[in-house]
Image: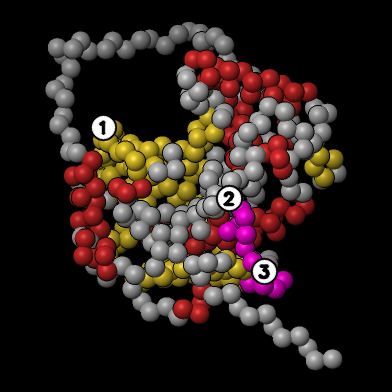
Amino acid sequence: MKNHSTKYSTRLRILVSCITLLFVACVCIVVSAQGDSTTPATQQTTTAEKTVEQVQKNIKVLTGLPESQLLPVMNFMRGSLGVRCTYCHVNKDGKWDFVSDEKPEKSSAREMIKMVLSVNKTTFKGNPTVSCYTCHRGRTSPVGVPPLPLPEVTPQPSPDQAKPKEELPTADQILAKYHEALGGSAMIEKLKTRSMKGTWLTSNGISLGYEVYQSGPDKLYTVLNTPKQGVFESGFDGTAGWEKSARGIRALEGEELFYLRRYPDLFKDIKLKEQFTRIAVGGKDKIGDREVYVLRGVTTDNKRERLYFDVQSGLLLRRISNMPTMIGQIPEQVDFEDYRDVDGMKVPFTIRISSIDPFYSSMRKFTEIKLNVPIDETKFHKPAAPASPSP
């Protein structure tokens, strides 16, 4: 666990690393200046990930959990109970002792985790159907009885009174209309590079300026202007990640490299179909006053997702992904707004991220987006270290 006295600096590095995820044809990962860091469910690596008990101390019930899921799970429990980390963990004079079992709430949490695991194993065939939120709903003590007086039950229409079922388009038809709404297949195939400038507004109101450059599926370069720590540059050349700041030049590895590459594909939110092992129409819904078609699918890395497409325009308005963990599905929501035409292609200029961890909730507002502009390849390469001064 990281000491909270260094949390801002560490998170800022992660923020710099994941700045390139901002757009990836519409999607981004989010950061704010406070809260607990989270890590992803699956690392982009060929080596097996260590489990949490192999990395942390005093792990008793979360054995077997991938280490990268520990903080997302902690944040999920924190949000489910409506508490802060200090509810279970010890913090004395600003110093965290995550290993300590001093607080009885930590023991209670372990018992509750055992209960959740048991219920899901015996009743739901091991699927993470029941979670902390199922009962707690933002309270430390679950409500066991309904409040009085009971609300009146609204009579349901009989089958013969029900409206005739609307015939919906197929998933292929919805995705095809989305491609056409973006600008058509020829325009999509033409997309090779992208540059973006805008403002990153964190959940606590801090505004950061940034620039993002992409070339092909995985070459990235970013410039982030921060109010306290100056300019951060980061990049990925297709093989290695790096960061340059006032502190010097360093390699990005592990968690930071994952966030830099979390959405490396230029077509992450454009070429959708191949990302799913199965996808089907889930009905109609509404986002605000807009009717949307909902697609439900399972991704190649076993995440459940819902995609919301505007019935009229065909454009993607929302994407919700769920990371499966042993104690429940951890959701993340991305909303796409203010689509504009950029060189014949529709592009969202506002992106909102909602996460269990407020650290990752933010809004990105672009002021300039350019497609297929020449980008100097040297931008993506790790800068050379400055020469040492002569003795």
Q: Secondary structure at mark 2?
A: loop
| Residue 47 disc label | 2
Horizontal and vertical percent position of residue 34:
65, 49
Q: Amino acid at mark 1?
A: Gly
Quadrant location of the N terminus in the rendered image: top right
Instruction: Name the residue that disc number 1 marks.
Output: 283
User: Percent from the top left, x then y, of residue 259?
Assistant: 55, 55
Q: Residues within 10 Å of mark 2 (few under 14, many from 20)?
A: few
Image height of 287 relative to 386, above or below? above
Q: Earlier in the sequence, mark 1 or mark 2?
A: 2
In which quadrant is the C terminus drawn? bottom right
Residue holding disc 3? 250
Q: Is residue 146 in view? A: yes
Choose between 275 and 116: the one closer to the eye: 275
Residue for point 31% across, 67% down: 191
> Residue at 49% of width from left, 15% of height from top?
123
Q: Which residues are magenta?
A: 244-257
Could you say which is closer to the camera, residue 156 or residue 185?
A: 185
Identify the image quadrant of residue 94.
top right
Circle on res. 104: none
Element at label 1: strand
First in residue order: circle 2 vs circle 3 = 2
Q: Find out whether the residues at labels 1 and 2 contact each other: C-beta distance under 8 Å.
A: no
Query: On screen, 49 above or below 210?
Result: above
Q: Amino acid at mark 3?
A: Arg
**Which amino acid type is marked by label 2?**
Thr
**Would residue 340 be counted in the magenta stretch?**
no
C-alpha span from label 1 to label 2: 39 Å
Is 243 situated above or below 336? Answer: below
| Viewer-nearest of discs 2 and 3 | 2
Residue at image coords 69%, 24%: 110
Q: Is residue 135 above or below residue 375?
A: above
